[in-house]
Image (spheres, helix red, strand yellow):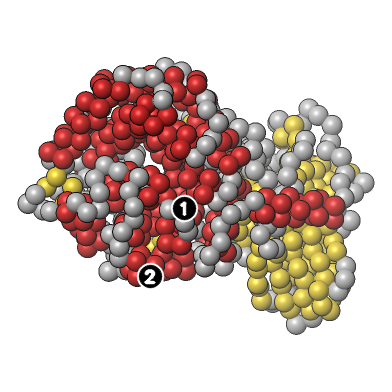
Amino acid sequence: MRIEDYALVGDCHSGALVGRDGSIDWLCWPRFDSPACFAALLGEPKHGRWKIAPQKKHSIRRRYRGDTLILETEFETADGAALLIDFMPMRAEHCQLVRLVRGLRGRVAMEMEFILRFDYGASVPWVTRLDEGIRAIAGPDLAVLRTPVDLQAKDLTHVACFDVAAGETVPFVLAHGPSHREVPPSVDADRLLAETEEYWKQWCRRCTVGGEYASIVHRSLITLKALTYQPTGGVVAAVTTSLPEAIGGVRNWDYRFCWLRDATMTLLALMNGGYYDEAAAWRNWLVRAVAGSPAQAQIMYGIAGERRIPEQVISWLPGYERSAPVRIGNAAAGQVQLDVYGEVIDALHQGRKHGIPRDDAAWAMERHLLGHLEKIWRDPDEGLWEVRGPARHFTHSKIMCWVAFDRGVKAVEEFGRDGPVEHWREMRALIHDDVCRRAWRADKGYFAQSYGSDDLDASLLLMPMTGFLPCSDPRVKGTIEAIQRDLTVDGSGLVLRYRTRRALDGLPPGEGVFLACSFWLADALCMLGRWEEARALFERLCRLANDVGLLAEEYDPASGRQLGNFPQAFSHVALVNTAMNLSQHAKPAEQRAEEKVA
């Protein structure tokens, strides 16, 4: 299936992707970054999936149940209609995935195929029968599937055929636990459904977003919540690994980790949505993850703050539509990306501005980060796009170094924190002059991607939002217009990150438009006062979401397909912030730039 044919269910510990055809093709247990037990998404059914669907030809409609993460897929056949309800209860002790088949009209003949494969499809479990289902064990993993339906073993899988009549419900409950512990106890599936629905309803009642875009913003905030690891507050970039940025290409990365570059925009999206508890948890995760020697700060961490995320190739998985390699772990964790210093310090600054409780340890850490940044800001780095080519003096990285010192100055001036403010002012002015002198291409009329280059980079759409230069500056306007002219595809307003080529990023060229960058263009147009253009672009981007409101990382205008890992937190954060820039009293562009939007 296409990437956009999937929907997400989750429990704020992990998440499963459910296809339109009723097949769960991806699930990592017990955490987002654990080995997958259903991995057909990156291979074939034999690598693990769980499919429930009618036996006969049928039509499909699906939706989330109101403002929840409960997925409902309606199958219509010549004999009647049945509803497949998929959800993951909020976790107590054990991971659980519940599937309910409910008869709506007539009588529908259904079939089920259950192929459980631990360790990314590599490990076939040892299966034994229970009174009400089966138990599967492989190494440290144990899973129990309970259902009243008779399960038949066939070729190392389990299958079943059953009928569901109007008013009947057939439950399937899959639970996971460590193999050295007792089997997870039996549960009441209807009770779990009611509790899960109430949880999401209560969570959504806290949302303060209204206006014309409220529905899609609510869905994006629910998705962002689902990508949050509840025990620590960390937010993963996506639940998947290695979904390609170009079909058949090699730009396939593991996104089941937490990136610091998303920090400020994630914080603003949560706070402006009314979710201060989640924003505070994210801020606290940030402080704990970065804690330690400033020289050892990383650009990304594991969901509990782990620092070691070694990258390796899973050779037995052929990849999504043969897009290999399949990678787990991410070598970018070892890169130098100077922008993360500015991201961390700006996020903590925004937290102070919006009333997140004071944390003196966080301020001490900020001071140490600024002391280290003073020593290294002149160095080249790999930039926020994590290029695997030569390090460069990326303009966005230098701007974020300026942001770090600017926010340090404001912490002293506006919040009374102690620090060498005069020295920080000097550093701020020094970096500002360096960027304006070395990145500005007067002959081209724009700021370049890196010092000495002619390349454009969509990250520079963020320049006015950071407060580095106002949108009224002709250099900013020229850069925005150059990106709109030369980095959009076929005049669509859909923005490429940059023009890919091996000499720049060390990989073969080719990828889709980057959805977050396209939202940034809409934000920049807002700041220029070009509201109609901004609104038209935003609404076009919203129409790229799938039928249940989810976005991947990228989009291919030629094929009309979503690309990259899914669903993508960065895309949904960008959507929320742009919607607020267009319609809300709290405008993230103004909040971050501290400048009134035109």
Q: Residues within 10 Å of mark 2 (few under 14, many from 20)?
A: few
Residue 446 falls left or right of residue 560: left
**Residue 190 place in picture, x, y as percent:** 85, 55
Q: In the rendered image, which quarter contains the C terminus?
A: bottom left
Task: Identify the residue at horizontal 71%, vertical 70% (top origin).
Answer: 74
* Residue that carries the numbered disc 2 in the rendered image: 536
Q: Nearer the viewer, residue 285 or 252?
A: 285
Disc 1 on helix, strand or loop?
A: loop
User: Compared with residue 321, is residue 28 higher up or lower down, i.e. above or below?
Assistant: above
**Residue 521 place in picture, x, y as percent:** 33, 58
**Residue 145 place in picture, x, y as percent:** 80, 47
Q: Residues within 10 Å of mark 1 (few under 14, many from 20)?
A: some
User: Compared with residue 523, is residue 242 higher up or lower down, i.e. above or below?
Assistant: above
Task: Identify the residue at horizontal 39%, vertical 57% (top origin).
Answer: 519
**Tag 2: residue type?**
Ala
User: Compared with residue 60, is residue 173 higher up or lower down, i.e. above or below?
Assistant: above
Spatial CA span between label 1 and label 2: 21 Å
Task: Identify the residue at horizontal 72%, vertical 66% (top origin).
Answer: 53
Residue 250 falls left or right of residue 97: left
User: Compared with residue 123, is residue 26 higher up or lower down, i.e. above or below?
Assistant: below
Residue 2 falls left or right of residue 134: left
Q: Nearer the viewer, residue 48 or 484?
A: 484
**Total numbered circles:** 2
Disc 2 on helix, strand or loop?
A: helix
Identify the image quadrant of residue 347: top left
Q: Is residue 9 visible?
A: no
* Residue that carries the numbered disc 1 in the rendered image: 586
**Residue 477 place in picture, x, y as percent:** 21, 56
- Which residue, as the protein is rendered here, is positioned at the far top? 293
Whether the residues at callouts 1 and 2 have beta carbons within 8 Å, the answer is no
**Tag 1: residue type?**
Ala
